Image: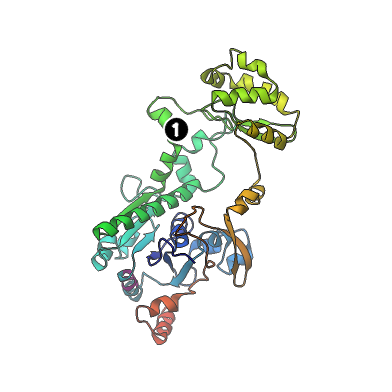
Amino acid sequence: MSKQIMQGVRVLDLTNVLAGPFATLHLALLGAEVIKVERPGSGDLARRRGIIPGLNEQLMGVSFLAQNANKKSITLNIKSPEGKEIFKELVKGADVLVENFRPGVMDRLGLSYDVLRGINPRLVYCAISGFGQTGPDAEKPAYDQIIQGLSGEMSVNGDDRLNPLRTGFPVCDTVGGLNAAFAVMAALFHRERSGEGQFIDIAMLDSIMPMMGWVAANLLIAKQQPVPMGNDNFTSAPSGVFRTGDGHINIAANEQGQWESVCDVLGLEELKTDERFQERDIRRQNRKALTPLLEVKLAERGTMEWVELLNSNGVPSGAILSLEEALNQPQVKHRETLKDVEVDGIGTIPLFNLTAKFGQTPGYVSSPPPRLSEHTGEVLADIGINEEALSELKAKNVI
């Protein structure tokens, strides 16, 4: 196997559920040694969350399996005096610490960044929370749904019949996790040049808002309020979802030449000279008149036939797939987006590989998500804790 870009980097992962585990998953896929530090007896909350009760009972819930490949698991009660001391020993040999507690929790535990950097000045400490470590909302509880609403993201989804509308997956958690992984990598690069660790403050609210770039820019710069447009693309027309003879199709004719090709392929050449549709901005204003004219022709053939005709004439188009269909596309299989992984006691499950394809230092799934405390003995042995001491710590519920 090729050397991985984060090989030799040790990450202490105190995160739960999604945003934090998604961040550390990407570090693990790139080769970092990610050690989940979990609560004895229960572990990551996601171990008990999922749609298969039997897996929840095993503390291997579907939600946990999805985000924790390539990681090790130890259990450690960092509220106990012994647990704190063990944790500090682990920090001495760590490069990165990631946590997603509510702001102030690590301070109250006596394990704040200021304390830990005194132990290891090179430590990169990343704290992920809903609103960040500072500001009037810093200590408020937050889940993805709450951040979707407060970010304005739900207000731009849907249409005049259904708005506000939640995005169909935890987009704020996911983007927050990606932002954290990106920030950790940048901080490690800085450390290579300076020798300095640092504190990173990641807020889910901060993370999601720039993702609405063009929509937000229209408001901030052009002073244009966003209008929920459903499946239509506000930047151009025809650009959106259209009915066909057997379903729906996405068409994105964003350039004038593409619009003219749409007219040619559909046999609607007369629309090219119709004053309502001649220019891009005028077409956008008249999209409600344009869509029915296109759909009358699109109804004459099935989606895949139109996709082939339009794409071959330079018009970006595609079918609208179910998630199952999307995951089984030849393109997705060719890219090895998923990898089958054998999980002891569960069987073979498909998990996402790293989707960035590195030419020299590839990232990939190399080990299954860990059982709770699977690596406690191994990791603690590295700091001199022997079997007898492990037994004593377990008896006291420290591990």
Residue 390 position by quadrant: bottom left
Rate crowding at label 1 as few (under 14), some (14 to 19) or many (20 or more) other CA atoms within 10 Å.
few
Q: Is residue 398 visible?
A: no
Q: Residue 288: horizontal and vertical position, in percent?
A: 61, 21
Q: Residue 331: horizontal and vertical position, in percent?
A: 62, 49
Q: Is 61 included in the stretch rendered in magenta?
A: no
Q: Is residue 322 visible?
A: yes
Q: Residue 85: horizontal and vertical position, in percent?
A: 31, 74
Q: Residue 362: horizontal and vertical position, in percent?
A: 48, 59
Closer-to-camera residue (45/377): 377
Residue 103 position by quadrant: bottom left
Q: Could you tell me what secondary structure mostly forms the magenta stretch?
A: helix
Q: Is residue 272 above or below residue 135?
A: above
Q: Identify which residue is drawn at 55% across, 22% down.
A: 284
Closer-to-camera residue (383/263): 263
Q: How many marks?
A: 1
Closer-to-camera residue (389/285): 285
**Range of residues picked out in magenta:** 87-91
Q: Which residue is mark 1?
A: 214
Q: Left or right: 91 with respect to 194?
A: right
User: Given the current orientation, which residue lies at the most extreme bottom position?
Assistant: 388
Residue kind at label 1, given as amino acid type: Trp
Q: Left or right: 392 with respect to 280?
A: left
Q: Identify which residue is drawn at 72% across, 24% down.
A: 296
Residue 299 position by quadrant: top right
Locate the C terminus and report the quarter of the image it occupies: bottom left
Closer-to-camera residue (175/131): 175
Q: Is residue 185 above or below residue 116?
A: above
Q: Identify the secondary structure beneath mark 1.
A: helix
